[in-house]
Amino acid sequence: MAIDYATDLDAVKTTRDTGVTVTITPPVASAYTIEGHLNDQQERQEVGDIGFEDSEPTFGAKTADFTSLDHADTLTDAGGTVYAIQDIFNTGDGWTELKLQDTT
């Protein structure tokens, strides 16, 4: 059975359960906060004999919780790290995933 994020996550709608609270700041509207999952972990990548650290931060939350969303918006976490929104993926089941780029 598939998860319907639009309704199933209401039972766990606390910061402790869903991850973190971030601030979304549109360029021409008021900023707002939203709870969701922020993945900003660095991963070790290997290409042949060369290793490097790669980070592709993402943020996911219930689609209905976003007041507005645009590629020009920024996302700021509680630690003050500011991310530019690179891509917006609406999964069609009530969940939206953002691909981010660290701008700090």
Image (cartoon, rainbow, N blue to C red):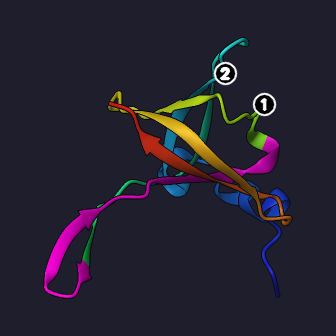
Q: Is residue 46 left or right of residue 67?
A: left
Q: Position of residue 26 (x, y in %)?
A: 67, 21
Residue 5 image point, x, y percent: 78, 63
Where is 75 relative to 50, above or below? above
Residue 4 location (% of width, % of height): 83, 69
For image coordinates 75% across by 37% down, the residue present is 66
Q: Which mark is residue 68?
A: 1
10 or 51: which is nearer to us? 51
Q: Position of residue 97 (x, y in %)?
A: 65, 56
Label 1 crowd bin: few (<14), some (14–19), many (20+), radius 10 Å: some
Residue holding disc 2: 26
Q: Which residues are magenta?
A: 46-64
In the rendered structure, does residue 15 fall within the stretch colored magenta? no
Whether residue 98 sits left or right of residue 57 in the image: it is right
Answer yes or no: do the residues labelled 1 and 2 have beta carbons within 8 Å? yes
Depth check, front residue: 19 or 74: 74
Q: Along the line of sight, which residue is nearer the eye, 49 or 89? A: 49
Using the numbered discs, state the Cα–Cα distance from disc 1 to disc 2 in whole angstroms: 8 Å
Q: Quadrant of residue 25?
A: top right
Q: Amino acid at mark 1?
A: Ser
